[in-house]
Amino acid sequence: MRYHPFDIYVHTMLSLYELQKINSDYLVRLAMLYHDVGKVGQYEAYQTGLDRDEIRKILS
């Protein structure tokens, strides 16, 4: 799979969730937030991934 199977919101939330497990440095979190800035249009490649309700369940 070349692209993530979910939108940029879900990708960002999952990335932050996983990052907090291994690193609490705010600069690393900031870098994670900006690592996909140039890829904004790519999330449309797969539109059948997790929705916001599903990700909220995972994160709660």
Image (tube, helix red, strand yellow):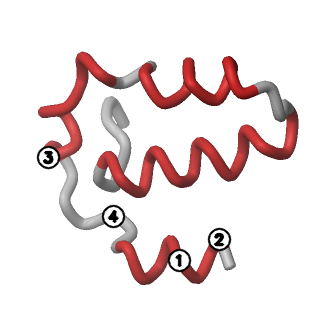
Residue position for label 3: 44
Give the residue at x 42% y 82%. Answer: 53
For discs 3 and 2, the disc positioned in front in the rendered view = 2
Q: Give the Cα separation between the discs numbered 4 and 3.
A: 10 Å
Relative to the observer, which residue lies in front, 43 or 13? 13
Q: Secondary structure beneath disc 3?
A: helix
On the image, which quarter does residue 3 sit in?
Answer: top left
Relative to the observer, which residue lies in front, 54 or 45? 54
Dot 4: few (<14), some (14–19), or many (≥20) neighbours within 10 Å?
Answer: few
Residue type, numbered disc 4:
Gly
Residue type, numbered disc 3:
Glu
Q: Give the Cα separation between the discs numbered 3 and 1.
A: 20 Å
Relative to the observer, which residue lies in front, 44 or 52? 52
Residue position for label 2: 59
Question: Mark 2–mark 1 contact, CB under 8 Å?
Answer: yes
Dot 3: few (<14), some (14–19), or many (≥20) neighbours within 10 Å?
Answer: some
Give the residue at x 34% y 73%. Answer: 51
Q: Give the Cα separation between the discs numbered 1 and 4.
A: 14 Å
Residue position for label 4: 49
Q: Earlier in the sequence, mark 4 or mark 3?
A: 3
On the image, which quarter does residue 21 sit in?
Answer: top right
Quarter of the image that includes the C terminus: bottom right
Q: Secondary structure beneath disc 4?
A: loop
Judged left or right of residue 41, residue 12 is: right
How many numbered marks are there?
4
Residue position for label 1: 56
Q: Which mark is residue 18?
A: none
Judged left or right of residue 9, residue 35 is: right
Q: Give the Cα separation between the discs numbered 4 and 2.
A: 16 Å
